[in-house]
Image (cartoon, rainbow, N blue to C red):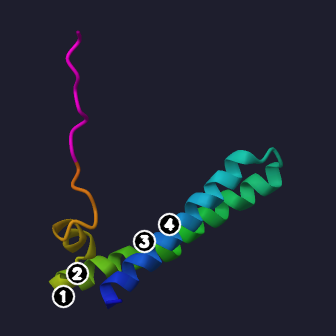
Amino acid sequence: MTVGQKLHQCLAQLEGAAASLKTFCLDTDDQTAKKMYAQLSDTLQNQVISPLQSRVNYVETQEPQYKVYQQAMKQGEIPQPHQPQQYDDE
């Protein structure tokens, strides 16, 4: 696994954790827990994910071979975005 892949994997896992915390926040009726989950999600986003995303962007500008998403699309590992199929009314 390349450095670029490891960075992207770490970033994706952190984003998943932040999303889970937001889900916990929405799923609970306990106001104390709701506040805690929201604060943890915000802290994770602002103090970990955002700086790491900035670092990933910097690394990709310095070392273009680490542009993992674009490389995966070129290799067919990630499907190309496409328009929804439209059907004719019959």
Mark 1 Cα shell of 10 Å, populated few (<14), some (14-19), many (≥20): few
Report whether 41 appears left or right of 88: right
The one of 69 and 47 positioned closer to us in this rendering: 69
* Residue 18 at x, y percent in the picture: 57, 64
Q: Vertical placement of 85 versus 79: above or below?
A: above
Question: For the point 73% across and 55% down, which residue is it?
Answer: 35
* Residue 9 at x, y percent in the picture: 43, 77
Are discs 3 and 4 less than 8 Å apart at CB? Answer: no
* Residue 81 at x, y percent in the picture: 23, 50
Specify the label residue 50 is tagged with. Answer: 3
Secondary element type, mark 1: loop
Q: CA distance from mark 3 to mark 1?
A: 20 Å
- Disc 2 marks which amino acid? Glu
Q: Vertical placement of 76 versus 79: above or below?
A: below
Are discs 2 and 1 less than 8 Å apart at CB? Answer: yes
Question: For the point 80% across and 49% down, which residue is it?
Answer: 31
User: Which residue is denoted by mark 1 in the rendering?
Assistant: 63
Are discs 3 and 2 less than 8 Å apart at CB? Answer: no
- In this picture, which residue range is highlighted in magenta? 82-90
User: Which residue is denoted by mark 4 in the rendering?
Assistant: 15
Q: Vertical placement of 74 versus 33: above or below?
A: below
Q: CA distance from mark 3 to mark 4?
A: 10 Å
Question: For the point 16% across and 82% down, which residue is it?
Answer: 64
* Residue 79 at x, y percent in the picture: 26, 57
Q: CA distance from mark 4 to mark 1?
A: 23 Å
Are discs 2 and 4 less than 8 Å apart at CB? Answer: no
